[in-house]
Amino acid sequence: MSRFFEALERAEREQALGTPASSPSTTADLSEAQAPPAPSGAVEPAGPPLLERPVFESPATELAVDRSDRAEAHLVTLLNPASFEAEQYGVLRHVMETLRKSANLKVVAITSAGVGDGKTTTACNLAGALAQSVDARVLLVDIDVRRPAVARQLKLAGSKRSLVDALMDSSLKVEDTVEHLAHFNLSVLRAGGPTLAPYELLKSSRLEALLDQARQRYDYIVLDTPPFVPVPDCRLIAKCVDGFLIVVAAHRTPRSALAETLDLLEPAKVVGLVFNGDSVRRSSYSGYYHAHVGSSRGARWRRAWRKP
C-alpha cells in the first residue's frame, strides 16, 4: 500500500477518534525504492496505482479558501510571486508548459474529490504562475456555477458578464465576458449565478463552443470546477478539457472519495495529483519535484520524486 493512501487512511482514523492529525512531511513514497510489503492478508486499495501518476505538493496555505477576509493570503503567485510558496506552484506551471508542447494540453480542469480541499486556491495560483510569462495569454474560468468562488477570492466587482450569461445568450462571445487583469497579465471569466439549472447549462453545446473560442485566443485555460464526486458537473465537461489536476487535501480527503474520483475519471485525462496543506516549510531546493515523461497522455507523468 502506498504511503499516500496510508496517510489518508491514518487521517480518517484520527478523525474518528477525535485526535488532531499530524502533518506528513512528504506526499507519498515517490522514491525509486518500493514501499514496504503489505502484511499477509492485507487488501490493496482498489483503482489504479497512484505511483502511475505524478503527485505534486502545494505550499503550506490555508485549506479554507472561501473566507474572503483572508483570501489575499492564498494568492501567492499574484501578490508575492518571489515567495517560497509561489515557487512551488512553478512545478505545476512547468507541467502545463511541457504538456502544451508535447501533447497540446491547453485546457486543464482543477477538481477535487470533495468540498474544501483547496481547488480554487490551486486554480488561481496555477493561473497566476502561468501568467508570470509576459508572452503567455492565460484565462482563468470559474466553471463552478453551483458555488462560484474565483471572483470572491480575487475580489472582483460584478460589472462584467459571466459564464452563465454566455451560456444562456448565444450572441455573447468569450471576449464579451472576460475581465483582463492587466497588472497580473491574466484574464478571468467569472461563473455568475448560482443557477437553478447547472446540469442543463453544462451539458449544452454552448460550453464547448465557448471553450473552443477560448482555445483560439489563449495559450492556457485553467478551469476551477466543482468537486468530482458530489455532483456530475465534471463528468459533463470532461469532453471539453484536455486534462484534470486532482487536488487532495492532507488529512482531509477521504481515501474512498479519492479512489472513486480516479475510478470515474478517464485515466488518459488525469494529468496528476496535487497534495495540498502540508504545514512543513522546506528550505533550499528540498521542496522541488521532478518527473519523467512517458509515452501517452495520463501515463505520461509516470513518476515524481523528491530531491534529497
Image (cartoon, rainbow, N blue to C red):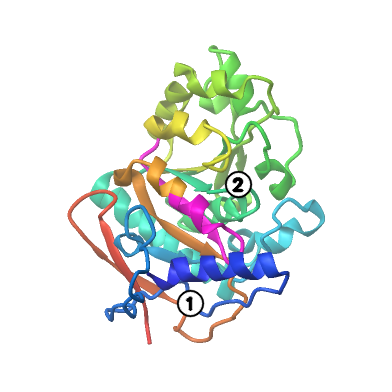
Residue 255 colored in magenta in the image: yes
Amino acid marked by disc 1: Thr
Disc number lying in front (2 or 1): 1
Label 2 and label 1: CA atoms lie apart by 37 Å
Q: Quadrant location of the C terminus?
A: bottom left
From this viewpoint, is residue 82 visible? Answer: no
Local secondary structure at mark 2: helix
From this viewpoint, is residue 296 visible? Answer: yes
Q: Where is residue 296 in the image (x, y as percent from the top left)?
A: 21, 50
Q: Give the range drawn in magenta.
A: 241-259
Which residue sits at x=52%, y=26%?
174
* In this rendering, position of residue 266 left or right of residue 15: left
The circle on residue 26 is: 1
Amino acid marked by disc 2: Ala
Q: Where is residue 34 in the image (x, y as percent from the top left)?
A: 29, 78
Mark 2 burial class by Cα count in 10 Å: few <14, some 14-19, many 20+: few
Q: Quadrant location of the N terminus?
A: bottom left
Q: Do the residues labelled 2 and 1 touch (CB within 8 Å)?
A: no
Which residue sits at x=70%, y=49%?
153
Q: Earlier in the sequence, mark 2 or mark 1?
A: 1
Query: Vertically, is 4 above or below 122?
Result: below
What residue does disc 2 label? 182
Local secondary structure at mark 1: loop
Residue 110 colored in magenta in the image: no
* In this rendering, position of residue 249 left or right of residue 138: right
- Residue lying furthest left: 295
Q: Position of residue 222 (x, y in %)?
A: 49, 44
